[in-house]
Each structure stands twice: as C-alpha cells, then as structure tokens.
Image (cartoon, coloured by chain):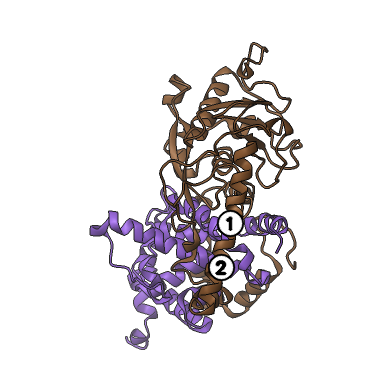
Chain colours: A brown, B purple
Amino acid sequence: MTYEPRSLNHHNHHHHHHHDERNANDAFPPELDALAARLSADGAAWQNRLPDTARVAERIRAIPDGAPSAVSVDDVTLPMGAESPTGYGAGWNLPRVQRRRRVSSSGWGRFLGFAAAAVVVALIATVFAQLATRGGQTTGPAIHPAPTHAQSQPTAVPTLPATTATATGYPVLVYFSKNPDSYNDPMAVFPVHRISPTLGVATYAIQQLIAGPTSSEASAGYFTELSTVLQRGGASSCGGPDFKIALNMRGTAPETGTATLQFCRQTASPGIGADARIKAEIAKTLTQFSNITKVVILLQDGHCFGDESGADVCLK
Amino acid sequence: MHATEGAKSFAAIVPHHASAMLRLAAALIGPAEAEDAVQEASMRAWQAWPTLRNLDAVRPWLLQITLNVCRQWRRGLKGQQQAQMRSLPEESDGQHLHLLVTLEEDPGTSNNTGALDLRAAINALPDDLRAIVILRFYAGLDATEIGTMLNIPSGTVRSRLHRAMAQMRERLQPPDLAGATHPEMEGRS
C-alpha cells in the first residue's frame, strides 16, 4: 500500500507530481495569463456549486459496509434463475489486466470459467441451506455466527421481489420520507432506486437509507432523519457496522417472516414524529423483500426503537 | 487482496478522489446528476477493486470509470431526449468526448456579465477545444489526464488549450482592442 491518508481536497503525491508537471508545462504566454486567471476563478466558482464533496465521500466510504464483498451472500437471496452481475464491466475501458482476462473466454479458459462458476454456485447453495435451517444474521461486513437459539428455525430465506440483476448489480428500493407529505403523515414514504453491488441487498438498502438521499433527491424533497438520529461518531457495539439485521427473529425469539434490525450505535431521537418516519422508512425498505413481512427495530440496548411506553411493545 | 483489507483500502483511498470524480461527472453530465453518477462509478469501482493491481494508478482508474458511467448515463438520456441530443458513438473512444461536454451558461452569480461572457466564449469554441478548456479549468484535470480521456498526447492537449484560449481572448476583447492586436491589423494606419 503506497497511499497515505490525506484530507479530501488535497491531492496525493502522485497527483502532486501531475500538478507540478502541469504547472511547469501549462505556463501560458503573458497575453493569456489574465484569461487563465479568469478561467481558474470561474472554474472555482463553478466547483463551489457542485454537491458537497464530504457527503459524496461519506457515501463512497459506506459502500463496502453495505456490500460485504463481491461474492458473499448475507441476508437476502435472489430468486432462482436470477442472473449474477458478472457483466458489470461491459463497455468499460478496464485496466489492461482485466481486459486480457475478458478476451480469454474460449477453450480451457471457458471450461475453467464454467468450473469456477459451478463451484461458486455450489458454495452459495451451501450458504443458503445453512441460512435456511438456522436463520440468517448479518451486520454488514462482519459475519457473525447465528445465535444458538435460532438453530431450530425451519424458515425460508428472504427473497427479492421479482427482479433481475442489472449490468452493475441488483436493483433495490430505498424508502425515504418526503416533504411535505411525510410531515403530514409519518407513514408516507417514497422509494428511490439503488443498485446493490452484491447479494447483500437488505443490508445495502438500509446502509443507503442511512447515507441519505442524493442531492437531486434531496432537492426533490426526499429526506430521512435516520442519519442524524444515529450517532455515527460513537462506538459500534457490532465491531464497526451501524446496525445488524436478524432474519426470522422477533428480538431474540424466532418468528418466521419477521426481521429484527438492531442499531449498533446510540441514537438520539428529536421526537415522536421523527421516530415514526424512521420506522416507516426502515419497515417499508425491508418489507420490499418478499419473505420479510414484519420488521422490529431495536435500540443498541435491545429496547424497542421509538417506544415511548417503555414496555417494549414491539417484542410482544 | 483479502476482502477486509480490500474494504479498508477502498474506504481509505477512494473517498479522497470523490472531489475529482464529482467535478468530472459534473462537467460531463451536469451538476444535478453528478452525485448519482459518482455513486454509480464508486460501486463499480468497489466491484472491480480486487482487479486493481497498481494503487498508484487509482486516480486515472477512477476517473476512467466515472467517464464511462457518464457516457452510459448520457446514452440513457439519449433515449429520453433524442430530439435534443446529437448521436453518440457506440464505442467510447475519447475523440467523441467533446460531444458530451457542454458548460451551463449560467455562471450562478448575479450581475456577473464577465462570467456570462466567459461561459459564452467557451461554448462558442469548437467542440474539441471546448472539451479541453472545461476539463482543464472546470473539472480540474491536468494535461496528462485530459490526454488519457481524449486519447491524444498531453502535448497536443497543451497546444489545443493555448489555441482555445487564444480564440477566447479574441472573442472576449472589445472590438477596437481585438482589431488593434490582430496580426493583420498591425502596421496599418
């Protein structure tokens, strides 16, 4: 690893080199200096109108959290016959190494490709079988063993709604609140499209909910209070992720069709309305998957999210 | 690269290039869609991350992915706005990049006629020169990176940049000054 962490708006050593080179070779004739200065100033003004870089960087940083790896399966599976997203690179100018791999798809290369695909399918099938017999639990990039009390869970693994993989991944919906509708009705949520790069679609969808709407979506009124409610600066009780999802579980009790999302960080709710909107966003986002019919949301300490009664009604 | 290590290196490295990716995307498809395009490009980069052998090349690699995402983005738009757009090439060779680049005329500042004139002068340039000016001063790329995008040597980028700026200077100067500095006018009484 040759890269060193650096601040967002600073270039790395490699790019410093580029800038040095550019500065040396892009010296303009004196009569063009004034115009170059004007262009630089206007370019800077134009850049100031672009979406917030810090937010974009945060969204990028969240991608591996929402996508544990390029081949693993976590909490939600695709229906039989769904295609894998192997065509993600179609039409790209890929790095040379990868281009070479793509063109060697005949003879032994093709045979080995089929063999590798068969092995992957077999491995995935094994994972599915294990999940189906004990219930699955996921916390984003970390893989946790299923709880022992769930071993007698003879439940199906949640599936995506009828969908096919796109060239880049698996389409999912993320449900946000929207101004003004959701202020009048906290249960009113509205979907936006995302493409999950892996089969970990439920985790990815919630991760995207936490990341918030894009600037264009935000300008259209979409919002969530989840990103502010979740104290992301605090420690994660799950070893890093913001939340974990247990399938076919109501809290610690097995229950077919119920998914339990538990936050791994402390939360600070601004009020009942925000709690209701967040619950609606999470519930609608997770119940898009056909085998999830109910959603339980727990705080880091295991109590029900947004339960003003303190009676943990959601667990009963 | 181990998966966990890959996730760590991705999260540590790629966000630092968000600004460059964002600027490029905004120059190619406009600021409104730029964030979504960068998100898409980043997801593709994450999927292809294990194939990246040379981390020193990560910036041009990310910019290339961003460029390709923007091309596909525009192809998608093409279907919806066919009447408003020129045809795009099927193959993504850099020579046609200029077809994608158009700078918004509105500089975003009030009463700034100078900026308006500047944008108008840029958009009046021939396509190949306009692309270089926008990528250089607005997307913030250097000559080497622009050359990679356009499939031309960096020296050609620089010469075209100078030519573009000379044309802009002509256009931006008041008529009397432009005439006074025009080579053909020199020496005339």
> Horizontal and vertical percent for residue B3?
69, 57
- In the image, is residue A117 above or below residue A103? above
- In the image, is residue A194 above or below residue A149? below
Q: Amino acid at mark 1?
A: Ala
Q: Residue at x 57, y 17 (%)?
A: A272
Picture quadrant where residue B89 is located: bottom left
Q: Would you say B102 lies left or right of A241 here?
A: left
Whether labels 1 and 2 belong to a single chain: the reply is: yes
Tell me the number on the disc at residue A122.
Answer: 1
* Relative depth, front residue between B24 and A121: A121
Q: Which chain's residue wears label 2? A: A
Q: Which chain's residue wears label 1? A: A
* Relative depth, front residue between A170 and A316: A316
> Horizontal and vertical percent for residue B178?
36, 75
Most extreme residue toward the left is B83
> Horizontal and vertical percent for residue A251?
66, 25
Q: Secondary structure at mark 1?
A: helix
Tell me the number on the disc at residue A115.
Answer: 2
Q: Residue at x 59, y 80 (%)?
A: A25
* Relative depth, front residue between A64 and A233: A64
Marks 1 and 2, how far apart in space? 11 Å
Q: Residue at x 66, y 36 (%)?
A: A243
> In which quadrant will I find the C terminus of chain B?
bottom left
Instruction: Decide: few, some or many residues near mark 2? Use Cα within 10 Å; few <14, some 14-19, many ≥20.
Output: few
Query: Could one spot residue A53 in this view of the protein?
Result: no
- In the image, is residue A18 above or below residue A194? below
Tell me the number on the disc at residue A209.
Answer: none
Q: Would you say A187 lies left or right of B82 here?
A: right
Q: Secondary structure at mark 2?
A: helix
Q: Amino acid at mark 2?
A: Ala
Instruction: Decide: few, some or many residues near mark 1? Use Cα within 10 Å; few <14, some 14-19, many ≥20.
Output: few
Among numbered discs 1 and 2, the one appearing first in the sequence:
2
